[in-house]
Amino acid sequence: MYRHAEDDELIDPANNPARKVAKPARLPSTRRAVAGDRLAEINHTAATTGNDPALDTLLLRLHTETACRRGGALALRPQDLDPAQCLIFLREKGETVRWQPVSPTLMAHLQQHAHDRHAPRDGQLLRYRNGQPITSRRYDHLWTRLGKHLPWVATQQISTHWLRHTTLTWVERNFGYAVARAYAGHSDHGSSEAGTTTTYVRASINEVAAALAALTEQPHPLS
C-alpha cells in the first residue's frame, strides 16, 4: 500500500514509515519431490477417473516434463509449438520467456489436442472437449479429485507445483545445478543467492534437452 502511495506521489519516499519495518522472512516451503511410485499413482488415478482423463493426463505430463508453472501451461498456444525441434515456447511470471524441450510423445499429444479441440493458432491451446479454454480451476478440480482417491494427496496438499519440485530435483541430482537452473527457466537477474558464477556456467538448451531425453527415455533432436 505504501509503495503504491509512493508511486502515486502521495507521500515522499523519505517519509514512508513502511521502509523502516523489516519484512518478515518467508517460511521454508513444505513442497518437495514426489517419489516415483507416488507419481505413478497420481498419473494412474488421473487416467482412470474424472470426466476428461485425456486432458488431465496431458496436463500432468506437460508439467512433469517441462517443470513449467500453471501460468506457463495456460498461456501456451498452438503457434508456440516447434515440432521439428520438439520445443515449446513458455511465457511465465515476471514476463520471462524461454524455449523448453519436450519429448516427441508430448509434442504429438499437444498437437493432437489442439487439432481435436479446435484451438486457434494464436489462442489458448489447452481446452475442454467443447472447445472452451481451461482455467486454473481445472487444476483445482483435478487435485481435489485426486485427493479423494488418494488420501495422502489431500493430507499433504500436493499440487501442480510439486511436479516442478519433482522434476527439478531429479535434474539437479543427475545433471547438476546449472542444468536444473536452466531447466527451471530461472533468470540470472534479480537474485544474489546463486552468485555471479552462474553467468559463466549457464547451461545450454542442448544440455536441457539431454536431461529431458534421460528423464523420458526418448531421444530428442537437440540432445
Image (cartoon, helix red, strand yellow):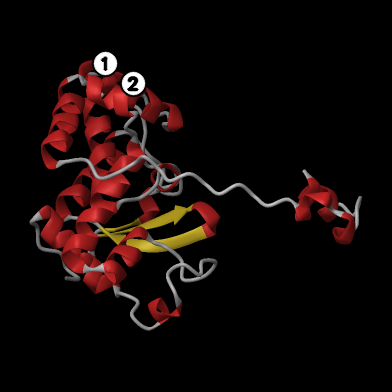
Q: Residue at x 40, y 48 (%)?
A: 77
Q: Is the residue 59 above or below the residue 52 in the image?
A: below
Does the CB distance between marks 1 and 2 fall below 8 Å?
Answer: yes
Q: Total marks drawn? A: 2
Quarter of the image with the N terminus is top right
Element on which disc 1 rests: helix
Q: Residue beneath label 1, please? A: 148
Q: Amino acid at mark 1?
A: Lys
Please indicate, yes or no, whether residue 5 appears anywhere in the rendered image: yes
Q: Nearer the viewer, residue 193 or 97?
A: 193
Q: Is the residue 104 above or below the residue 198 in the image?
A: above
What is the distance, in whole Å, between disc 1 and disc 2 at their CAs?
Answer: 6 Å
Q: Amino acid at mark 2?
A: Thr
Q: Residue beneath label 2, please? A: 144
Please indicate, yes or no, whether residue 135 appears anywhere in the rendered image: no
Give the side of residue 126 with respect to residue 209, left or right. right
The percent coordinates of residue 215 (x first, y second) are 14, 56
Element on which disc 2 rests: helix
The percent coordinates of residue 102 (x first, y second) are 23, 56
The percent coordinates of residue 162 (x first, y second) are 31, 41
CA neighbours of label 1 inside 10 A, class few (<14), some (14 to 19), many (20+): few
Quarter of the image with the C terminus is bottom left
Q: Residue at x 83, y 50 (%)?
A: 17
Q: Residue at x 50, y 70 (%)?
A: 192
The percent coordinates of residue 168 (x first, y second) are 27, 55
Give the side of residue 16 with respect to residue 157, left or right. right
Q: Nearer the viewer, residue 116 or 24?
A: 24
